[in-house]
Amino acid sequence: MLKEFKTFIAQGNVLDLAIGVVIGAAFGKITTSLVEDIIMPIVNYFTGGGISGGITLKEATVDAAGKAIPAITINYGNFISVVINFFIIAWVLFLIVKGANRMKLTEK
């Protein structure tokens, strides 16, 4: 069984998948940083900082026992950041697939 497992792991598909996952995770971190550290501050500058926040539905309170009850908020700024992040990743993947398809067509 160990020999079969070693053969399975050594196959190109498994190694390609592992490399793709690692590169994908790194690319996700890069795009997250791009959106949060570069794009969103620019958007917030032009919108007066409104997109980075949220809407408070209920203020934070303290109950009779002295336990803090956190505020209830809708964090739309974070949602917009994640949507922008998604579109950047989707666009890059589209370009990669388009390039790969073009290379396949030129090979034939």
Image (spheres, grey):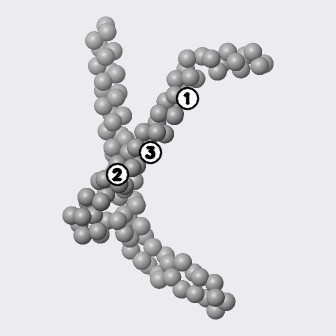
Q: Which mark is residue 18?
A: 1
The answer to whether residue 83 of the structure is visible from this angle is: no
Specify whether 67 is left or right of 56: right
Name the element at disc 1.
helix
Q: Report if residue 70 is visible in the image.
A: yes
Residue type, numbered disc 2: Val
Q: Is residue 15 left or right of residue 65?
A: left
Residue in the picture at 64% in, 21% down = 9
Determine whether 48 is above or below 93 in the image: below
**Quarter the C terminus occupies:** top left
- In this rendering, is residue 21 above or below 62? above
Q: Residues within 10 Å of mark 3 (few under 14, many from 20)?
A: few
Residue 45, image x and y in percent?
A: 24, 64
- State yes or no: discs 2 and 1 in contact (Cβ < 8 Å): no
Secondary element at tag 2: helix
Tag 3: amino acid: Lys
Q: Secondary structure at mark 3?
A: helix
Specify the amino acid type for callout 1.
Answer: Ala
Mark number for residue 35? Answer: 2
In this rendering, is residue 94 above or below 47? above
| Disc on res. 29 | 3
Report the residue that reaches farthest toward the left: 46
Q: Residues within 10 Å of mark 2 (few under 14, many from 20)?
A: many
User: Nearer the N terminus, badge 2 or badge 3?
Assistant: 3
